[in-house]
Image: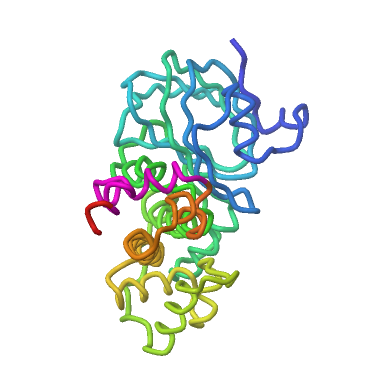
Amino acid sequence: MTTPPTASDHSRYPPAAPADQEMARVLGTTPFRMTLDQSGAGIAHWKHGPLHDVILPMTHHVIMAYNGIVQRMQRRSGRSTVIGTVRPGVVIIIPEGSSSRWDVPKPVDIVQLYLPRASLARIAGEAGIATPVELLERTAQPDPITSRLLLSASDFLEGNEVLDTLFRQQLIDLLATRLLAAHTGAPATAQPARGGLAPKALLRAIERLRSDSDTDVSLAALAAEAGLSRFHFCRAFKESTGLAPHAWLRQHRLEQAMNMLRDTDASVMSVAAALGYASQSAFSARFRKLTGETPSDWRRRAR
């Protein structure tokens, strides 16, 4: 059996790799779904067979939530061996730069979060938590909140670049806040929300979200326009509208789709393209998930 490298052994291995690349190497497959930003932060849904290999150091923290088969697994780091039961409701955390040997005997359905150290530090600073912070290594650690958030993430990837990007940014910030509270050496509670956005700031944010041009609707751009951090902008926007920015934009796009289907003769493919979906099938799947009907069926009923 291969022994995982210790800190002194790392010079024998290539430099730490981005998390998605190392996972693709060790799992020997491609993700079922994945969305990443330029920093490598993102979410990936993997379905892979049994695993008996060493995961080498990565440049991101990796947080995993399991779905499907309940099974025992073993994780070995140096002389330390941990045996755990993976199932929905538990998480595994591989801190940036760590390495361990994994033995997972059965196929796995898993969603992973790739979180750069800089992103975790930014969220800590915005939430008023002292830095630096270090994530604890976790093996099959009960945490139904983080598990549920991660396992639901794959279902919300819509095949729409703008919506997927905004959703990914919000979810990563939310998960980072949760990790700071539950999986660091000094858990802390984030500061409570302090009211909604000022009326002018809310109007500017909504105008940016509604724009049909190439206006930047990233979380960073929205927060900068309001003069707030991403962390506090999301809280204030939800306080003002009842919805997170991603949920508000998704509802707006749904209303646009309904108007086009009801009031024009544009094909479903044209509607999907106009709203930024990568394909008609991605648009139709999301429309049906939100309304219970296909776009064509909804159009026939609405007219």
Question: Which quadrant holds the N terminus?
Answer: top right
Question: Splitting the image into 4 quarters, where does residue 10 fall?
Answer: top right
Q: Position of residue 267 (x, y in %)?
A: 44, 52
Question: Viewed as shown, does residue 80 lie left or right of 152?
Answer: right
Location of residue 194 (image quadrant): bottom left
Where is residue 240? Give x, y as percent. 31, 78
Q: Position of residue 181 (x, y in %)?
A: 37, 55
Stretch in magenta: 279-299
Relative vertical location of residue 206 with respect to residue 136 in this rendering, above or below = below
Instruction: Tell whether 58 sits left or right of 80.
Output: right
Residue in the picture at 54% in, 41% down: 95
Q: Main secondary structure of the magenta part?
A: helix
Q: Write the residue at 50% across / 24% down.
A: 80
The colour style of the image is rainbow
- Residue 286 on the magenta segment: yes
* Residue at x-position 33% and y-position 47%: 296
User: Foreground residue, 7 or 183?
Assistant: 183
Residue 95's place in the image compared with 125, above or below, is above
Query: Could you say which is closer to the camera, residue 75 or residue 287?
Result: 287
**For the C terminus, which image quadrant?**
bottom left
Quadrant position of residue 98: top right
Can the viewer see residue 24?
A: yes
Q: Is residue 154 magenta?
A: no
